[in-house]
Image (tube, rainbow, N blue to C red):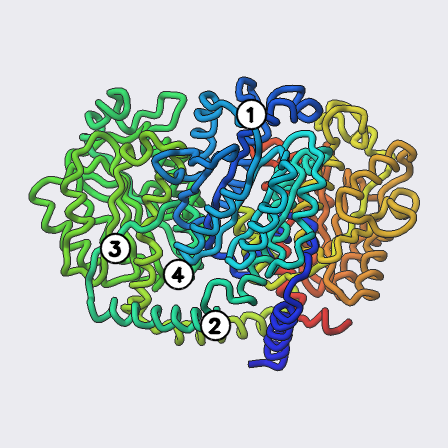
Amino acid sequence: MSDSSISQEVDGQSKARERRDKKFYVIRDNFQTLHDVSKAMIEADVHDSELIFGIDYTISNKTQGKTTFGGLSLHDTSGQNMNPYQQVICILGETLEVLDKDGRIPAFCLGDSLFPLKPEGPCNGFNEVLDVYKKVTMEKDLSSTLDIVPVIEEAVKLVKETRRYHILVIVTCGKIEKENLKPTQDAIVEASKWPLSIVVIGVGDGPWETMMTFDDGLPERVFDNFQFVDFQDTIEGAKNSYAAFALRALMEIPDQYNLIKDHELFGLKQSDSHVDHEKDGETNARTQREKRFYVIKDNYKTLHDVTKAMADADIQDCELIFGIDYTKSNKSQGQKTFGGLSLHDTSGPNFNPYQQVICILGEALEVLDKDGRIPAFCLGDSLFPLKPEGPCNGFNEVLDVYKKVTVEKDLSSTLDFVPVIEEAVKLVKETRRYHILVIVTCGKIEMEDLKPTQDAIVEASKWPLSIVVIGVGDGPWETMMTFDDGLPERVFDNFQFVDFQDTIEGAKNSYAAFALRALMEIPEQYNLIKDHELFGLKQSDSHVDHEKDGETNARTQREKRFYVIKDNYKTLHDVTKAMADADIQDCELIFGIDYTKSNKSQGQKTFGGLSLHDTSGPNFNPYQQVICILGETFETLDDDGWIPAFCFCDTLFPLKSEGPCKGFNEVLDRYIQVTKEKEPSGSADFVPVIEQAVKIVKETKKYHILVIITDGKIVNMKTTNDAIVEASKWPLSIVVIGVGDGPWEDMMKLDDELPEREFDNFQFVDFHKILKAESNTYAAVALGALMEIPEQYQIIKHHELLRKN
């Protein structure tokens, strides 16, 4: 263990001891963004918690919406929009359900007495809480006085029974009678002896003095277990009311959870628990190897659970293969489930079942497929590739080629899985990597093909390959069920069958329900593959090889000096994961904004003929959009939140004369103010802003990202080239966003030319091109801007440009 990690461990132990010794202190609201608080929850190891709702059904709800809810009762559900109770349930349910493993939420109604929202027991997820709330609200008379003691006692009872961490969310208009104050205080103090956080959300007009007292008073508590949030005050004026409210509500959870662990309120030390889990893990792995074959059970309740399990299994990279059934039976297998049409019919406005499966699973699994290349095959009398030239580039191309092939292709007579399974095994052998073979089929396997199919599945179980078969159409599916849980001669249970229609029917979120069922067995299959060492080499050896490869690559990059960085990422998730892998924990953001005269004419095609700096309309102009998107994307990496921002035209001047802006919201505010006062003039020169960025890097000795937003009319290419080359000697990435009509040839040259640079430090993004092509502009612009950052940062480390400072 390094000195650094030892000192961190000692620091952690000291802090925990200090917290215990100090006994009680008020937890401060220290987080600035929802990302900060969710990151802190991960660091606090809040992997699993249970959620409880308490909903105030007292008569004061009728009058407490005078100011904040248009004079309506706070429980009014007759309008098109959600009432405050529904909003809170929706936002917090959605935010916290990722921590709630079983998805079952006990919910109670508060008033003169306590009763369950759903008499039969807990609700299944926050959507059911919403549904039952609406039904109960229509039927229930409001009671006279509010008492939150019974729901706190009920929560403590649940904690005692389960010995698990719970978060009790009480949504209330807050009218606690004087005689109930002392019992409420006592209940909160008593609850602080258990692993329970209490979050009270005040809806309506207030006042909230009593709740404030509960929040930061009561020093006799074991820890500060109570957080109060004024809902209306939090969402009012917030650009993103969802995020602002979720942030305030979760603000104290990480610290509370740490204190619960420090005070050992679970009744056992975390370290003992960790050792037990480790021993259990080793025993389970050994048992699995000794037991050889067993049927994997479908244990997960939500899509979040299964994706988390995939992360826990360390499935960082896999390859996806599609097999698509093109047999004649597809013509008749849609009688009940596809309106009598052929299952391959593509003439309607909606996707057919094959298209739906490709879309959902392609999207769900592509985050694991590093190279994005998907081999896809057509099944029938013979096997042939969907795309003759080779693998498809991403699932979108699978969809496109599928549609084209389907229009041209005649359906064949009999179905045979064997060739596609053998092809998948062949690919696994060649690459020595884990693959998932997805076969989409209407499932009519002839009797004479059953035995060869079974043999092929058994043979495939000797390799790192999972087979997921999706049944589309009317069925029946008995044969597939046999393959799923039979064949005990397999090395491991490598086959999962999913009835598509049965899974999506009646599901509130058919996408999530189907993806969950299809991915259900993947985590355990992958663990078994590792246990049986089916990769052909032990994980430890693999780690050594990767380490050696990493050192070789780093050395090659240093020796090679300059090369053009390719845009390799397909999704925003991929690039943010790569940034985490590159260990970019802290960087500083700098904005450069183009105030030259050409902005007046560069919006002819792309901004309705207006100046690109026009702020008179109801919507953001291109500069505001970019500041908002990139500010929000990058601020998660910017620890201090201070953003130097500059305007460039004839001269360079700061956007805020007093110094850096505090967060991207202040950049936006200052931009509007300056734009109203400043007349665009002169011609664009990037050099001063690049030199200013280099100066800041030299002074701070930290990695910076300079974002230049411009209409792209550069007058002096030679000096700009020289400035970019000079900047490549420092830990600085330059991202240029082109707004307006273009053309962008000069920017393209700057992006991938200039080989005399130390590294490829420049990325160009055409904002309007993305705006035109993408449905999710935010994600697409953020992806384009972040695309080269992970590799740039790696090269900066390899060239030791940070150390040079």
In three-dimensional space, the C-alpha distance between marks 2 and 1, rounded to whole angstroms, equals 46 Å
The circle drawn on residue 271 is: 2
Determine which residue is flagged by label 1.
Answer: 75
Q: How many marks?
A: 4
What residue is drawn where x is 32% and y is 27%?
A: 407
Distance between mark 1 and mark 3 Cα atoms: 46 Å
The correct choice, above or below, for 23 with respect to 566 in the image is below
Front residue of 118/346: it is: 118
Pointers 4 and 1 in contact (CB under 8 A)? no
Query: Where does residue 492 sit, x and y in percent of width and height?
Result: 23, 60
Q: Which of 1 and 451 lies nearest the eye of the viewer?
A: 1
Is there a contact, CB below 8 Å, between mark 3 and mark 4? no
Mark found first going from the N terminus, 2 or 3: 2
The dot on residue 313 is 4
**Mark 2 and mark 4: span between their CA atoms?**
21 Å
- The amino acid at mark 3 is Ile
Q: Position of residue 261 (x, y in %)?
A: 53, 65
Q: Earlier in the sequence, mark 3 or mark 4?
A: 3
